[in-house]
C-alpha cells in the first residue's frame, strides 16, 4: 500500500492517499525512511546471481537448474521456490522444450492397394479367420 502511495503522490496528496488506503501518514513516512530488511537485501544479492546464471545459459535455465547451479558453483544454499519467486519478479523464464509428437500421415504419392474384402465385413462368419 505504501508503494502505491509512493507512485501516486505526484497526483494526489499523501494524506488523501493514506486515508483512502486506510493507513496512517506517519506509517508511510516511517516506511520511506526505513532501510531494507535483511531478507530484502539477501534477495537483491541472490537476484543478481540468478540474472548472471540465466544470462550465462542464454536464457534457457529455469528455476531447478539455476537452483542447482547456485548450490554447486556459487555455494549459495536456498530453496528452489525462493529462486522461482525471484525469477518471477525479475521476469526471467526458462525454455521449456517439448517433444514433437509425430502423427502418421498417408503418402499421397503411394499407390492405393486393392480392396480384397470389398467392404463386405459382417459378423456372420462360421469360423475364425473366415469372411
Image (tube, grey):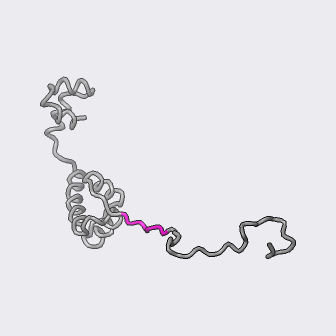
Snapshot quadrant of residue 75: bottom left
Image location (x, y in percent) of residue 47 = 23, 58
- Figure check: 9 above or below 112: above
Image location (x, y in percent) of residue 2 = 22, 35
- Closer-to-camera residue (25/2): 2
In the rendered structure, does residue 78 fall within the stretch colored magenta?
A: no
- Closer-to-camera residue (93/42): 93
The quadrant of the picture occupied by the N terminus is top left
63 left or right of 53 in image: right
85 left or right of 52 in image: right
Count of numbered marks: 0
- Closer-to-camera residue (90/39): 90
View extreme (right): residue: 126
In percent of the image, x 22 and y 63: which residue is there? 49
In percent of the image, x 73 and y 72: which residue is there? 117
In percent of the image, x 20 and y 65: which residue is there? 52
Image location (x, y in percent) of residue 4 = 22, 35
Image location (x, y in percent) of residue 21 = 26, 28
Residue range in magenta is 96-102
The quadrant of the picture occupied by the C terminus is bottom right
Magenta residues, dominant SS class? loop
78 left or right of 26 in image: right
In percent of the image, x 28 and y 67: which residue is there? 70
In the rendered structure, does residue 97 fall within the stretch colored magenta?
A: yes
- Figure check: 79 above or below 71: above
Snapshot quadrant of residue 9: top left
Amino acid at each position: 500500500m505504501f508503494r502505491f502511495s509512493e507512485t501516486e503522490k505526484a497526483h494526489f496528496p499523501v494524506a488523501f492517499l493514506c486515508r483512502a488506503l486506510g493507513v496512517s501518514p506517519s506509517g508511510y513516512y516511517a516506511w520511506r525512511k526505513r532501510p531494507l530488511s535483511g531478507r530484502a537485501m539477501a534477495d537483491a544479492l541472490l537476484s543478481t546471481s540468478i540474472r548472471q546464471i540465466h544470462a550465462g545459459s542464454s536464457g534457457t535455465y529455469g528455476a531447478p537448474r539455476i537452483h542447482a547451479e547456485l548450490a554447486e558453483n556459487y555455494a549459495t544454499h536456498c530453496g528452489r521456490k525462493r529462486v522461482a519467486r525471484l525469477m518471477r519478479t525479475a521476469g526471467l523464464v526458462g525454455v521449456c522444450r517439448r517433444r514433437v509428437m509425430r502423427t502418421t500421415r498417408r503418402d499421397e504419392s503411394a499407390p492405393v492397394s486393392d480392396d480384397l474384402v470389398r467392404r463386405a465385413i459382417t459378423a456372420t462368419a462360421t469360423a475364425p479367420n473366415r469372411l
